[in-house]
Amino acid sequence: MDPVQGTLDELGTPLSDVTFVVFDLETTGGAPAEDAITEIGAVKVRAGEVLGEFSTLVDPGGPIPPFISVLTGITDAMVVAAPRIEAVLPSFLEFIRGATLVAHNASFDTRFVKAACAGLGYPPPSNPVVDTVDLARRVLTRDEIPNAKLSTLARFFRSPTEPCHRALQDARATVDVLHGLIERAGSFQVHTLEELKSFVRAPTPEQQAKRHLADSVPHAPGVYLFEDERGEVLYIGKSTNLRNRVRSYFTAGETRPRIREMIGIAERVRHIVCSTSLEAEVRELRLIGGAKPRYNRRSRFPEKVVWLKLTTDLFPRLSIVREVKDDGATYLGPFASARMADDARIALHEAVPLRQCTQPITLRTRRAACVLREMGRCGAPCEGGESQEEYAVHVESARRAMTLDAGLVFSAVSARMERLSVEQRYEEASVDRDRLAAFVRAAARMQRLSAITRIPQLVAASPAFGGGWDIHVVRYGRLAAAGVMRKGTHPTPFVASLTATAEVVLPGPGPVHAASAEETECILRWLESPGVRLVEVDGEWSLPAQGAARHKARIDLAYRHLDRSRGREGRPLR
């Protein structure tokens, strides 16, 4: 019998025949076990034609956090008369029956749907799922778009619908993005649903051809460096198992377009074996800061930080500076950008009426006060409205807020946010929220850094894999030595030998004079991990009793809810 050539239909389901349900959820937060759905929007399409839409608000059964209301515009008043999820879910499950689900950052939305099904006794939907974030990373490059946010992709594909964190409108925008991505995937010979799903995770030919670069890398903790044919460092990373980590770059699990591009250029992988995982992490940071590889995204410019300085003038003011000096001034930071430092400065001005002018003021200075005097935001020492002694009270309040207790700033800005929220001025409230977060996080960070960078020498140990101990010597917040003490070794001579050969580190002003903030924070995370024991501390290690950490915990909790919701827009393209 003559062979019969198979048709395209026999090789898979043509995309033109697939019914897609593109959906989006709005929720009270990012944790399905704790949060609830507030809105569902879905669009059913096939072959580019809209077959139907599904849209409803959902009563979450509890209050919607103010941060979420600011983001989505959905308030408690809007959902008070809406149906509960138990009345909505059956209709939604019927709407998606037999369709392929599509969502932007699909894991977020599908987790909430599965949690709702589990809570109401329904089997979880078994529909195929396509994630437009993953697909965008596969078919688009960073030269085309800077990230995979829904708003960015909607503009790129010229969608007439602008995403606005409302479920149906975002679903409509995602439909346009899906069609654009499918058209782009066609140039990769992707024509069926099965090909589309496998295409996202398939390793590139460059990845397959470079697998041999991992052959000489050992199974040990350390740092790896991808280099091109000229020896230029392209990318630096670290791992507790170098061989396994480097191998992962040549598998289907590595989907970052930027890293796949790097693999195509790389010609060799150099490695540095380290004694401990902490040493590997610190070496990675130092190497990235020195070599500044073009494919690393973080830690490339540790020197590009700014500080908020309370000057030492006769009438001190707040100034943004690039350097910490041993001049007796009070500093807050480091900040990653001048914008963040300015946010913190505005937050502090909300609580303390320091002058905001930049002209020097002496006891003989007499000039007309600015509008801040009329607003009650400044005592106008420039025209003699406040004496040096009266102004010193504000200076001391600012200094205390920057170094010991951020409660004054937290209370002042929170009160303003509450007032703006009552007036439904959510955009302004969100700006104040970010300013307060910038101040509190910087204050908490500096207090943590300063606590350890004041210590001339600290020696600590943690249990090593397979027995023994990982020993680290830290001087003024910098890792000065690392070693592994084998099981059965007497600790006293080992620690004495390690400290005798450790790097010499000199004291200096500020919390980052000896190491970058990232390095010191790596050391702090290790010191706070389970099983770590202090062997020796030269001095005292303490934090302010009323430190900013107590306020940072509340802010971080609110931002976790916000970030989980924003996560549906997709992480930046790499």
Image: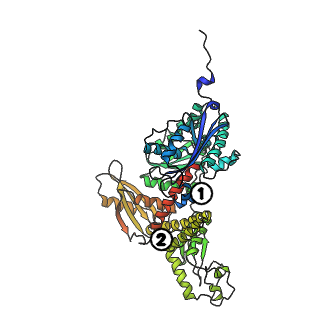
Give 437 or 173, whichever is nearer the viewer.
173
Residue tagged by mark 2? 507
Q: State the mark number for residue 73.
A: 1
Give the camera-side residue of 167 and 337: 167
Residue count near mark 1 (Cα–Cα under 10 Å), binned few <14, some 14–19, many ≥20: some
Q: Position of residue 284 (x, y in %)?
A: 51, 53
Residue 475 seen: yes
Q: Is residue 73 above or below residue 100?
A: below
Circle 1 or circle 2, nearest the eye: 1
Q: Position of residue 516 (x, y in %)?
A: 52, 62
Residue furthest toward the bottom? 364
Q: Which mark is residue 90?
A: none
Residue 190 lies in what quarter of the image?
A: top right
Q: Is residue 380 left or right of residue 513?
A: right
Q: Secondary structure at mark 1?
A: loop
Residue type beneath disc 2: Pro
Inspect this view and state whether residue 476 appears: no
Residue type at tag 1: Gly
Residue at image position (65%, 49%) is: 152
Give the quarter of the figure containing the N terminus: top right
